[in-house]
Amino acid sequence: MTRVLVAAPGENAELREPDVARSAGRVSAPLITCLLVAVLAQLPVLRPGWFYYADDSATQVLPMWYHLGQQVRNGIWPPVLDPDLLMGGNVAAETLFGVWSPFNALVWVGVSLAGDVGIAGIVVRTFALVAVALGCYLLCREYGAARWSASALATALPLTGSLLHFDAAKWPAALLAFVWVPLVWLAARRMVRGRTNAFWVFVLGALAVTAGNPYALLGVCVVLAALLVEAGLQRRWAGVSRLVLVSAAIGAVVPLVYLPLVRTAHTTWRTTSGGVHDSGALAPHLDDLLNLSMPTYVPAIPGVGVPAVYFCWFAVPLAFWCDWSVVRRRWRELAGPLTIAVVYLLVALGPSEVWMFRWPLRVVHYGYLALAVVLAVVLAAGLRLDRPRARGAATVAFLLLAVHFSAVRSPGSVALGRAVLIAALIGLLIAAALAVYRARGTGPLVVVLQVGTALTFCAQCLWFIGGGADLQYYFPSSPKQMRENYAERYEGRVLQIADTALNDRVPGDGSREMWRDMVMGNAFLLSDVDSVGSYTGIGFRAFTDVLCLGYDGSSCPAAYDALWRPPAGADVRLADLLLLDTVAVQHEIVPRPVVPEGWHLAERNPRISVMRRDEPASAGTGHLSWASPHLRVVSDVSDGPGTEGVDVRRTGGGAGRLVFARIAWPGYTAKWNGSEIPAHAGPAGLLEVALPEERPGPGRLELVWTPPGMRLGLAAAAGGAVLAAGVGIQQAVGRRREPAGAPR
């Protein structure tokens, strides 16, 4: 049968390179795309509850951004350590906050200046989602997609299930890291073609790496490797050479970011020793990904109640009407996105944990980025209107199967009704798209696609946001309110013995009562409360085991008893070693806690008891909490997060010991009267320094902490910058020497 390709009126059916002439559409198309994404990003906020202030966003990321912003404003950058946070204070080893990224520092400062971090979080998410859309649009255009098709896919990508419901809602630090991936891809491909200087590729790559999220690092690696394949197939050998050198330069930044974690991991929960595990946690299946165009499809993943694998409504239904021969004709040029899509398909369907990477659902939108590029290019070639019955039957079959799988995954009349309604809407939209294309060509088609994206997203917000199982917290998101609620009640250094999970047992509005008295994770950073408990992804085993602390600061009944007895290797109570002034105990854990000697009951209500020390312990300027009896402490001053100086006078001979209310993270060095001495983990994982035997008299101890491997990391990053600058200079000089009109 003869194939018929129906082109839009007045258009050539063959794909053309994008017009580089300045025109209104060159600016208006990406601008309208960004504005549309910005508006749609606000829709989840209209539903009950804080969509952007729940789960880890509320207890980990936003409060820490606020705190890090305050530190930057106080002149501390990079903020690699906060000893007062104890188990969550090794910010360098946590990596996720990207302490070496100047862009992240700007975000922190902005959040710290806000009157409400919840609202600040919405602003940050909005700008990040818009940046993702813009990066996707420019990337699609780079591969030759038309403005209308690039705009349609760029609008859809930020609203995909894995990106919106997980990175944007729960893990905004991962969202900020993903922003750089399409930009690195764009700049690197332009560099291969001689359109962008290599040094700018390095700058963008370094920003992606220093963002601190390993999935963004993996994304950069996959993108650069795929571009090497693409450039090699096109025999752009000069571009291949530059790409190899720039990739090495970007790789040289990695030790600066990740060496602290690698060299600290042996003391923490998080291992870097490798291993492959398949627990099925947040791991999609192939049949899930086949439903990527069904807005109501909830995958069969435990704990997931949202359309987590959704991409965009027209990807599959409109695919039956596309001219896929363009992929065959341009497969060498499209080798990059095709390779990336295949790699991430394999990763998404792989084990739930490989080495330090876990939860494959987190990489689905990386694959969708590549899919968006391919689909934008294919759509730009025009639709096929031949064999309408076969194509229409395929579209209807997909929609019916999508309804079936949606009903199977979420049994019940409500889910079935939603699936039928949304399938009917998609069917009408596809029919409208084909009618518009037949009558007006490709340009107006974008209106139908964008309207469909907005309508399906509105339906998702109505049905899946506001009533899900996401962890909701009811403590204030305003630092001012946090100070009013907690600062006067919890004085000095505070330890909270509570468990978030116990709050789930309280029905209805009673769940809000708990948050009148306590918060979890890093939330105390929004107030003036100096809390020992914090959120950590790595922990410090020797410390957390004694107090049975969880990742979000939750504890158990044994923690209260552990406070009032000496830990192994100590002669005083753990509460004294920690310099605690206030202990707040949730009655669900310890119904009537006994008030220890030297403390008094400051407050008791149906939910908590608050004990306060008779004489404050943390009023000093340092962190020294215990010294051997024959050592008289003259002064103890900490003039920075990683430095502390202690002047002591020996009243007797023999060796001595000093214990600090600091976690003994790897990276501490101690000098006694100018000579280096051992500093190691002592009781409960706290920092201990053993002083040598000497005669009675004065002495000075100086403590300094630097992230393990920082010097090597800085040297490697500097070397990478020099290498990238050299490649950039060579490229610029070579370009000047090229004759006019020479191919690049």
Image (spheres, grey):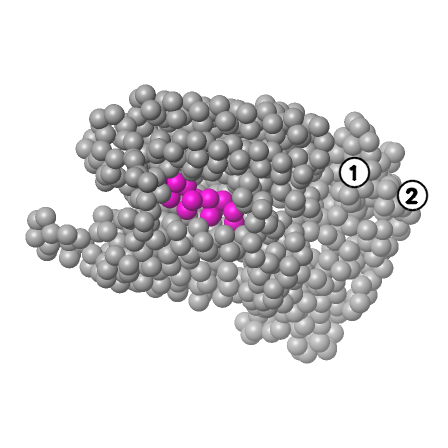
Residue closest to the eye, 579 or 350:
350
Q: Amino acid at mark 2?
A: Arg
Residue 423, which numbered label?
none
Picture quadrant where residue 60 is located:
top right
Q: Residue furthest left?
A: 739
Q: Position of residue 377 (x, y in %)?
A: 33, 40
Q: Residue furthest front?
A: 1
Residue closest to the eye, 595 or 87:
87
* Residue 639 located left or right of residue 181: right
Residue 592, which numbered label?
2
Residue depicted at 44% across the width and 35% down the height: 390
Instruction: Please state which of the two labelled residues, at mark 2 or mark 1, is closer to the viewer.
Output: 1
Q: Position of residue 640 (x, y in %)?
A: 55, 53
Q: Amino acid at mark 1?
A: Asp
Considering only vertical position in the picture, is 311 above or below 580? above
Q: Is residue 63 visible?
A: no
Residue 504, which numbered label?
1
Where's the N terminus, which quadrant? Answer: top left
Residue closest to the eye, 613 or 501:
501
The rendered magenta stretch, by its main secondary structure, is classed as helix
> How far is mark 2 from mark 1, CA to CA?
21 Å
Residue closest to the eye, 683 or 259:
259
Picture quadrant where residue 352 is located:
bottom right
Q: The magenta stretch spans which residues?
A: 363-378
Q: Number of callouts in the render?
A: 2
